[in-house]
Amino acid sequence: MKKLCVVLMALALCVSLVACGESAEEIADRHRAEYIESLAEFRELALSAGAQAEGLSGLVQDVWNDAIRDNHREHTERYVLSVRGHSWDEIYEMTFESDTARNLFFVRHGFSYNDFNTALALLSASSATIEARASIQSARSEVVSLYLQLGSPPEGLERAGDAASAMYEALDVLIDLANSPTGNFNSYSENRRNSIDEFMRNYRLLGDIIDTFGD
């Protein structure tokens, strides 16, 4: 009789555990869902950091381009052009009736184009660039933290893990290009283009995978 009671109690305990606990499949499904959620957050944080790095590296490329071609545009002039006797802060506070009047001001006072090393140094030292780099570094720290938390992907999400890694690596290259331009203009431009292409290709791929598992 006692043996029968022990058996019945054991069976009751097993039934209780099955009813209250998760099956292996349910645990796996939950882990996949959590991983997908983290991937989506990583993807958007990386995009934000990437957009900032793309913007700053694009300005570096434009300043570099205009400096070596003795050209200037509104967003590059303060780095590539020197106006005798006036700082750009002073010039930006002046009012000109037209672009022609503004250009005549440059001619009358005398202007010269900076070499590309000087232009890039002025860009690097500007308060706008310093603020942009600080913002990029803050965004990068968030991306790194979340990327490290992702860990190894659950079974079936290996492609998603690979895409996240590729995005992370491309972002790292793009941020380095924004912060520390090296090489010559052509190699810089090519490396920037390739890193953006690689980043966006895996951004779209990761989005497709997330949508597939989300459905």
Image (cartoon, rainbow, N blue to C red):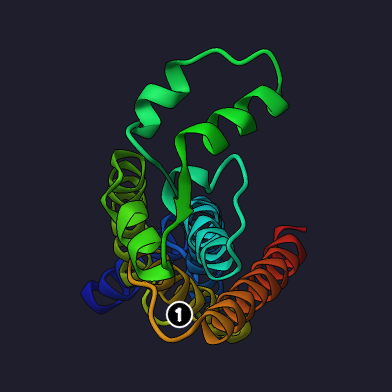
Q: Nearer the viewer, residue 111 or 203?
A: 111
Report helix, strand or loop for mark 1. Answer: helix
Name the spot of residue 150 as percent of width and height, x first: 39, 70
When the figure is inspected, residue 137 is found, relative to residue 158, above or below; the finding is above
When the figure is inspected, residue 138 is found, relative to residue 140, above or below; the finding is above
Q: Quadrant of residue 91?
A: top left
Q: Nearer the viewer, residue 37 or 106?
A: 106
**Residue name at image x 28 percent, y 58 percent:** 141
How many numbered callouts? 1
Q: Is residue 208 something one can see in this rendering?
A: yes
Name the spot of residue 59 as percent of width and height, x first: 52, 55
Q: Is residue 171 toward the left or the right of residue 36 in the image?
A: left
Query: Residue farthest to the front?
Result: 108
Name the spot of residue 64 as percent of width and height, x first: 50, 66
Quadrant where the N terminus sits is bottom left
Q: Amino acid at mark 1?
A: Glu
Q: Nearer the viewer, residue 182 or 16?
A: 182
Query: What crowding class fits label 1: few (fewer than 14 Cα within 10 Å), some (14-19), or many (20 or more)?
Result: some
When the figure is inspected, residue 58 is found, relative to residue 88, above or below; the finding is below
Quadrant where the C terminus sits is bottom right
When the figure is inspected, residue 15 is found, relative to residue 136, above or below; the finding is below
What residue is pinned by disc 1? 169
**Residue name at image x 69 percent, y 63 percent:** 207
**Residue name at image x 47 percent, y 41 percent:** 110
Name the spot of residue 139 as percent of width and height, x first: 36, 51
Q: Quadrant of residue 6?
A: bottom left
Q: Is residue 134 toward the left or the right of residue 157 in the image?
A: left
